[in-house]
Image: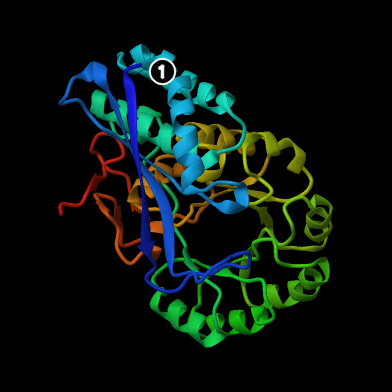
Amino acid sequence: MTLTIRHETILTPYRDPFRIARSHGSGAGATSVLVELRDTADGPDGHVGLGEGYPDAYYGETPATIGVVLPLLVAAAEPFGEGLRGALVEARAALVGASHAIEEAIRHHGAAKCALDTALHDLVGKRLGLPVHRLLELSPVIPPTDFTLGIDEPEIVAARAARAARFPALKVKVGGPSDLATLEAVRAVYAGPIRIDANTAWQPDDGARLIPELERLGVELIEQPFKAHRLDQTRWLQQRSPLPIVVDESSVTIDDLDGLVGVCEGVNVKLAKCGGIGPARRMLERARELGFRRFLGCMEETSVGIAASAAVASLADWIDLDGCLLLASDPFEGLELGTDCRWILSSRAGLGVARRAG
């Protein structure tokens, strides 16, 4: 084998406590797994591919499972090593082949797959001197990101909304008895579109009761109101809602999409769920074919994970790529947010990010 990988787990405090409806714990910090991929065929001074996987226990992943699964995934990608060292056309084909091999090596484990897939794209981009979006022949023009506010007392959420007023949309986490009070408080200090995310916490009566109030308050979309497997409830609410319902926990991989036709108007694609840059591109393209509105989301990742997501963001209608902005500090640099709240896709090779000195 010529591909070698090293991983490390980091815990990064949040700028503000961040809690969602299905959270467990204090919401004080984010745990992520960073990887460095090398190809010994490149010699001791060869390029290093960076990747990140955000393990979410909801999907059955932990830092420990990522560490166990990574060697299996690297072995699956190994047969494509020579192609990955090739010229542009050959390298692109090898990336697709390696991505499919990684997907087929083991079921689930999206964060582990994401870490390796992202590192492969970064490595190939660096070898060819191309930023990842150009490697994929995707546009650098992407939608602006929203900014997410976690669950807290209404007045605290409103204070955070006021501080984030420059963002063209806010995503407000809901799923408790203070939902309406929180949204009223946010609307009192923020004039732009509000997106809400219940993270599976509502019951059908909650949704039906709140729809008129959500319209009044200028809510743009409702994300994952009910349990992931309760597509019947989601369909029921979408039929009664003038607001688009976007599913997240119900749309993990591309294999979920066909079963969501007629259930909801939109799907949330996340690299850490579906397995990385290659799978996210395929999932976004398939969602477009099926007529879904496409929301590109993230976990509370560093700039590595957000830069990887931004590379495919031209395929999305809405983006929620604020993970690294929620962190008190980011161990990587190079990813810049424009004054219009659009991530600026780097002209540097690969993901365009590097570990901060010191």
Q: Amino acid at mark 1?
A: Glu
Q: Is residue 311 above or below residue 295?
A: above
Q: Is residue 64 above or below residue 176?
A: above
Query: Percent position (x, y) of residue 333?
Result: 24, 52
Query: Percent position (x, y) of residue 219?
Result: 62, 70
Q: Residue at x 40, y 40 (%)?
A: 311
Q: Residue at x 44, y 28 (%)?
A: 71
The C terminus lies in which quarter of the figure?
bottom left
> Which residue position is annotated with label 1?
78
- In depth, the one of 2 and 325 nearer the eye is 2
Local packing at callout 1 (Cα closer than 10 Å; few below 14, some 14-19, many 20+) is some
Query: Percent position (x, y) of residue 127?
Result: 25, 24
Query: Percent position (x, y) of residue 75?
Result: 45, 21
Q: In the picture provided, is 350 more to the left or to the right than 162?
A: left
Q: Is residue 256 above or below residue 268?
A: above
Can residue 81 be seen in the rendering of this structure? yes
